[in-house]
Image: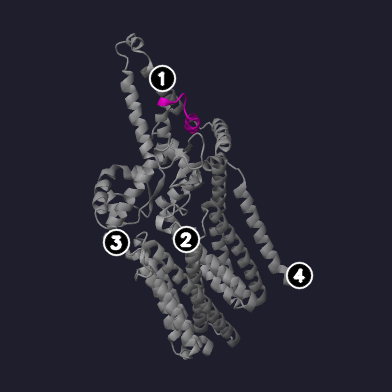
Amino acid sequence: MKNRWPTFVVLIAGAALMGSFYSALGKGAVERDFADLPVLNGGRIKPLDSVARNSLLVFSGKQSLRMNDRPLSAATWLLDMTFKPGLADTYPVFEIDDPEVLGALNIQAGGRRRFSFEEIRPKISAIQTQATHAFEVRPEIRTRYQANIARLWDRLVLYWKLQNTLEVSGTGNALAEAAAYEEALAAAAAPAPKNRKKAKDAPDPARVLAAYGQRHAELDSSAEYMPIPLLPAADDNWTTLGRAYVNRAREAAFHPAVPAFARLGDAHRAADAEEFASSLQEYKAWLKAQVPGAVGKARRESVLNRFKPFYVSLQLYVVVFLLLFVSFLRWTDGLRRTAYGLLALAFVVHTGGLFVRIVLEGRPPVTNLYSSAVFVGWCAALLGLVIERMYKNGLAGLGAAIVGFVTQIIAHHLAQQGDTMEMMRAVLDSNFWLATHVITITVGYASTFLSGALGVVYILRGMFSKKFPEESAKALGGMVYGIVCFSAFFSFIGTVLGGIWADQSWGRFWGWDPKENGALMIVLWSALLLHARWGSLVSRRGFMVLAVFGNVITALSWFGVNMLGIGLHSYGFMDKAFPWLAAFVASQAIVMLFGMLPARFWASYR
């Protein structure tokens, strides 16, 4: 029984995760059903749930709110944004941490970081003026204030578009407005004699119709997403509410989605839960009959959002790290086996999330920076499981947990930029090269980081722990050597494949682009490590120091090019990432200094 408790712990954790998954699958509240509705946004079909979560992440860095000490889901927030804009304007969603921006808004922070639109509204004109000046400056040379004021304006524009997508913000009775528009169409189409019989003070039908036309044109142009599938239905042929109103002028009746959304809006404003639920189910039944593929795809993405597999795996990586850390002090075997089981569980959850993303995108697993972070963590977990199975000493699992945790943190912050399954840029739109060059080079990143993480474990354990037996140190050295060989192979193959792709896309194999130089540096550094070991130029400890520096080179290659803002591989300037990259480089430099201290300073040598 004593030897079985690790198995019980893993089974209990697995059962808890299954319960969480079934909860994500469940239909649940009406707001959840609303969040499952498919829309076209950013060039792809996605659920309203993703629109809400991604928008909240952009606004506040979080996927939910807390109002009066109660959680407010992203779906409920979007409902209020759309149908109760006055109420939504009081929610503190705008994260502002720049003192200069707060000063320009004349807002007293009082320890707060998030503010409502109601607080910002009086300074909208000033923000627009300052943002206009900021947009005239190239992103890479903007001051911090200019970058933050431009970012705030972009978020305000998104906020306004969200409030004016399903109806014009401030609409009181959507069904009545739709009926009045149909009356205006009928009046404008009536013969002139009938019009002349009306009272002298009756409004001119043409002018009324023109006013409606302007209102609907604004609703069309301001829409953040397209919620209506055009008939005959097609999964990629959608339109806006505003355009559906405009189309009514030449059609016999409204598109079925128009009265459906009008009923939903009126029911939500009236807090009529029964009417809202029945209208929603009726509209969803119509959608399933017309665009079943879009409904199913949106549903799968909603489940992915609710289950949060990458956040779950992040938590498991933390638990694995803590268990293995304690196992080096006591209860070694039991904690190590428990940690291995939980690492396997984290890998399964991580794999599930990755697989669903592949299905949803119809692409290989790496398509942008966010997905590369997710994939690097997945590769590290896989390698850690395989190596841990061979050595059974907890060290590979510890390294995998570190890389898995850090990459998931990176992915979380990258998600704050918006949709993580955005449409591919034209030059990247090749499943073959995404599945060959991008995958192999990312595997090289993952293995280099894993070898570097194990190097950090070796140095810190040797520096601060007296319990670092020679057997463990030797095993760790063998692990890092094997991983560096693995990394050198994949980094080299990936770099060559990238050159072939570049030749096809840009007409040259190599152009000394910053990203290409970074990939080359990883290959050269891996080769340097191997030759230093083969030639006995460094000791085991020196080899570990060199492996840690591989973390620095890989981080610069992975993210550095996006901070330079130049080169063919630079697809977005990342000004806010620089302090974090600098902190990471500094941390690795400190570890390397520890590794280069004389042996008498290491606790394991005393």
Find out whether the residues at labels 4 and 2 contact each other: C-beta distance under 8 Å.
no
Residue appearing at x 74%, y 71% in the figure: 2
Relative to residue 380, is residue 5 drawn left or right? right
Q: Earlier in the sequence, mark 4 or mark 2?
A: 4
Q: Position of residue 451 (x, y in %)?
A: 51, 76
Query: Which residue is under mark 3?
Result: 140
Query: Which residue is under mark 4?
Result: 1
Q: Nearer the viewer, residue 195 or 425?
A: 425
Residue appearing at x 44%, y 83% in the figure: 528
Q: Nearer the viewer, mark 4 or mark 3?
A: 3
Residue appearing at x 58%, y 38% in the figure: 288
Label 4 to label 1: alpha-carbon separation? 79 Å
Query: Which residue is under mark 1?
Result: 183
- Three-letter amino acid code at disc 1? Glu
Label 1 to label 2: alpha-carbon separation? 52 Å
Residue appearing at x 32%, y 10% in the figure: 196
Relative to residue 491, is residue 315 drawn left or right? right
Q: Earlier in the sequence, mark 2 or mark 3?
A: 3
Q: Nearer the viewer, mark 4 or mark 1?
A: 1
The label shown at residue 411 is 2
Crowding near the residue tagged with mark 3, few <14, some 14–19, many ≥20 C-alpha atoms within 10 Å: some
Label 4 to label 2: alpha-carbon separation? 40 Å
